[in-house]
Amino acid sequence: MISIRRSQDRGKSDLGWLQSYFSFSFADYYDSRHMNFSALRVINEDFIAPDSGFGMHPHKNMEILTYILSGSITHEDSMGNQRTLSAGEFQIMSAGTGIYHSEFNASKTDPLHMYQIWVMPNQMNITPRYDERFLPKSIGKQLILAPTPTENAFIINQDMTLTRQIEVANTKETIEITDNRALYIQVVSGKIRGNTIEAQAGDALLVDKEYLLTIEFLVESEILIFNLPSN
């Protein structure tokens, strides 16, 4: 089965300094039809004004990935990490037994655009950890998250992978999804077609259980492919 989550149907919050689009129920946005997809709990697309951000706040038992699309972010946490990350960089935190962190756009002039992604872990109360990496964009597939050490991917405490794929126009490939797996495909930029369904930046394709999916890149596009246990 394949369905689409249109960009304009996402939840939205506008706090002035922060504009957010919620793929799943989050904060004041609630939709019982969109609570999660398998272990994928949050995909927030955030636009943060200069000299603004999230103050120190707690998390527990969640895998938290941040992908910087443009601008830069200054990170600080209770594990002693203090970092500034720029476009193309990823950071991951396993909140485990509990952490505090802040994320701030310290620029006085440039807005920050990022994806905030939460994955529910398959192990509770682990020791918190932090990692970060610059992963330059290139045509083709790049593994971002994996449950075991693989290539240059971050380790995640869940039976899933996340792949970033960038392709030029008219590239096409077919993916076979087995009956115990599901795909959530977030379009970061460009436009694709999944079988007969067109999706563009902000849209997502949801594919669940034993399905043959053909992806066609209609223009040069970037997508994030979450391969997860089936719902």
Image: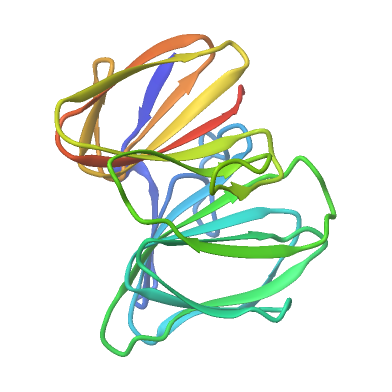
**Residue in view at x 38 percent, y 75 percent:** 72
Residue 4 position by quadrant: top left
**Residue in view at x 44 percent, y 45 percent:** 23
Residue 176 point in image, percent of width and height: 45, 13
Q: Is residue 195 visible?
A: yes
Is 207 left, or right, of 130 in this rendering?
left
Front residue of this view, candidates 203 and 95: 95
Residue furthest toward the front? Answer: 151
Give the image's coloring scheme: rainbow
User: In the rendered image, which quarter contains the N terminus?
Assistant: top left
Front residue of this view, candidates 120 and 33: 120
Residue 168 point in image, percent of width and height: 18, 36
Question: Vertically, is 151 above or below 179?
Answer: below
Is 225 left, or right, of 171 in this rendering?
right
Question: Vertically, is 211 above or below 33?
Answer: above
Residue 74 point in image, percent of width and height: 49, 80
Q: Is residue 55 visible?
A: no
User: In the rendered image, which quarter contains the C terminus?
Assistant: top right
Front residue of this view, candidates 81 and 64: 81
Residue 157 point in image, percent of width and height: 71, 45
**Residue in view at x 46 percent, y 32 percent:** 184
**Residue in view at x 50 percent, y 62 percent:** 133
What is the count of numbered marks?
A: 0
